[in-house]
Image: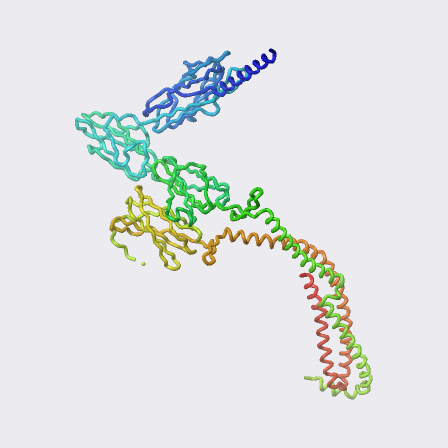
Amino acid sequence: MAALVVLVSTFLVLFSNGFLAKTHAAGSSLYLGPTTGTFAIGDTFTVGIYLNTNGEAVNALEADLAFPHDKLQVVSPSSGKSFIQTWITQPTYSNSNGTLHFAGAIPTPGIVTSDGLVSSITFRVINTGTAVIRFEDTSRVLLNDGQGTDVLHQKTDGIYYLTLPPPQGPIVTSPTNPDQSKWYTNDSAVFRWEASPPAPQGFSYILSDAPVDLPDDISEGTKNFISYSNLSDGTHYFHIKTLRDGVWGGVTHFAVRIDHTPPAAFTITISPNSYTSNRNPVIQFQTTDAASGIDHYELKLISLDQSSPQAMGEEQPFFIEASSPYTQTLSLGSYDVIVRAYDFAGNFYQATERLTVVNPIFEVIGREGLRVAGLFVLPWWVVVFVLIIILAVLLYALRIFWHLHRDIEKRLEDGAAQHPEIAKKLQELKEKQRAYEQALKRLVVLFLAIGCSWSFGFHAVRAAASPNPAASDLTVSPPIVNLAPSSISNDEILYLGGWANVPSASVVIYIEQTETGNTFSGSATTGSDGNWFYSFPQLLDPGHYVAWAELKSGVALSPPSARVSVTVTPTALRIGNVRLDYQELYLILFIVFLLVALALVASIVYHGYGFRRKKAKLAEAIHDAEESLRRGFAMLRRDIELQIATIQKAKLEGALSDEEKSREEKLMSDLQETNDYIGKEIWKIEEGEKGL
C-alpha cells in the first residue's frame, strides 16, 4: 500500500511539473490593436498595447516600442485606461528617435487576462509609405512567482499603410506614373487633370518634395496637363487646386516615385572559398539602394563544363529569386555565379563570381583506402607499398650522398698535402729545387774560371750592353548583350545572354578570334520577356575573342550589338584526343615534386651540415700547406736570384756562352713564375676551397 502511495505521489508530481512546464512554455504575449490599417497624411489614429497572459498570473511588465519617426509622430500617449496599477517609471516617448517606453507593476496576486490594455498611443501621419510599429527585444512580462521569471513568448507588431489624403480638387492622373505607390525608372512625369463642372477659371499647381503642400493663388491658366523632366531620384508630389467664381477650391495631392539609379555595386562572397572541394558552398551577397530600396535578388548558376546539360543545349539556366545566404548542392566543375540586385523601380546591378568545385586531393574512405583527387581509391596495402617505395628511394639517395660525404672526410684525413692543386705545386717546387741546386754548383765553377778575365772584357761588355564596313538601313533595334564572362579557360564553355525588344525572335550570335580572324556563330530565341541565352557547344582555343549579336525578326535584320571581349586562357593540356585539365596535371606534378623534395631535403640537410662542419677543418689545413709552399717558393726564388746574379757577373766579363744566355732567359721566366705563384696562385686555391 505504501509503495502504491509513493507511486501515485510521484506521478502527480511529474504530471504537475509537466503541466506547469507546458503552461510556462505557452507564455504571455504582447500585441497591438489594431494590427493594421490605412491612413492618410494628416490623419490621427490610436493604437492600443494589449497583454495576453495565457492563464498565468503576471505582476510586472516592460514594453519598449519603435516606430518610423519620418512617417509617424506621437500626439498623445495615454495610460489612463490601463490595468497597470503602479507605473515603475512614467511612460515616455521620443518623436526624434521613434521610441516608446512603458514599465509598470500589479500587486500580488497579479493579473490574469487575455486582452488587458497596457496603454493607448495616438499617432499622426506625416508622410506616405509603410509604417511598422514593433516591440523591441528588451520588452518583458514577469511571472508572479517571486522570482521575476520572464514569460514573454510572443510579440505581434503592427503594419500600417500611409497614403495621401483623398482629392479635394481636380482628379489627377499620370500616364507616365499611374500608380502612386510604385517606383518608376523614368526621370520625367506627365500629369493630367479634370475638373468637374462648371468650367474652371484656372488652375494653380506646384511640384515639391513635401507630401502636403499648398499651391499659391496665382492661376497657371486653364490647360489640363503639365510635364516635368530631369527629376531627381526620390518621391515628388504634385499639388493642384481649381479657381471658380473667384474662389480657390480644395487641393489634390499626387505622388510620383522615381528611381533610375541601380543599386550600389557589390561583390559575391563564397564560403569557404571560390575554389573549394565543398559540394555545398555558401553564396553571400548584400547591397543597398538609396532611393526605392532593395526589392529582391535573383541568382543564376551557369555551368562551364562542356559535358553539362547546359552546354549540350538540353537545359538553359534561368534566374531564380534568392536571398543571402544561398546554398545548393553542386556537381564538380566550374560555374559562373551571377547575382542581380533589383530595386523597387526595376533597376538592377549585376555581380559575377567564378566558382570551382573540385575533388579533394586526398580523402580517407574508412577501411577502403585513400581516394586521390576523386579519381580512384588506393587500398591501404597499396598506400603502404607506395610509402615503402618512397622510403627505399630516399634510402638509396641517402646512400649516394653518404659516400660523397665519406670521400670528403677521407680527403680531410689525408691532409691538405694530398689536395690536387697543393700536391701539383709541391711536386713542381721539389723538381725546381733539385734542378737549381745542380745549376748553382756549375755556376760557382764558372765564376772562378772567368774571374781572371774580368778587367779585359769590361769595356767590351759595356759596349755590347748599350741598345573600317558601312552600316545598312535596318529598322530592327539590335539586341543587348548583358551576360558574358570576361575570361574563361579553354576547358570551359562560353556563354552569352541578354535582352531584345522583340519576343520570340531569333538572335544570331557571332564570336571572332582576333588573332586568326576565325568566326563562329550560333542562334537563340528570345523568350516572352525578351531575354535570351546561348552557350557555345564546342570548347575554344586559347586567345582573345570578340562577340556580338544581331536580332532577326522576320526578314528584317538589326545592326550588330555592342561587342564584348572574352579572353580564353590556356588552362588545359591536350595530348592527341585526350584532354588533361590542369587539376590532374597539378596533382601529378605535386606528387612528383613531393617525392623529389623529400629525398633532396633529407640528404641536403644532413650532408649540408657535414660539409659546413668539416669545411673549417679543411680550410685550416690548406692554409698551413699554403704557408709551407710560400716558404718553399721563397727559398727557390732566392736560389734563382743567386744564379741570375752569377750569370750577370759572367755576362759583364763577356764569357757568357749561348747555352748560358738561354739559361738566363729560363731563370728569368722561372723567377717571374715563382713571384706570380707566391702572390696569386695560393690565394686562388684558398678562394676555391672557401667556395666548397
How far from the left and from the top, in percent, is residue 245? 18, 25
Q: How is the image coloured?
A: rainbow
Q: Which quadrant of the view contains residue 429?
A: bottom right
Name the residue: 63% across, 51% down: 388
Foreground pick, 49 / 556: 556
In the visual, does 240 lie left or right of 118?
left
- Count of labels in the image: 0
How far from the left and from the top, in percent, is residue 94? 43, 23
Q: Is residue 54 above or below residue 672?
A: above
Foreground pick, 609 / 621: 609
Q: Is residue 382 above or below residue 623?
A: above
In the visual, does 388 lie left or right of 313?
right
Foreground pick, 452 / 634: 634
Q: Which quadrant of the view contains residue 452?
A: bottom right
In the visual, does 152 lie left or right of 201?
right
Q: Residue furthest front?
A: 1
Foreground pick, 478 / 299: 299
How far from the left and from the top, in percent, is residue 492? 43, 50
Q: Split into 4 quadrants, where in the image is the N terminus?
A: top right
How far from the left and from the top, in percent, is residue 16? 53, 16
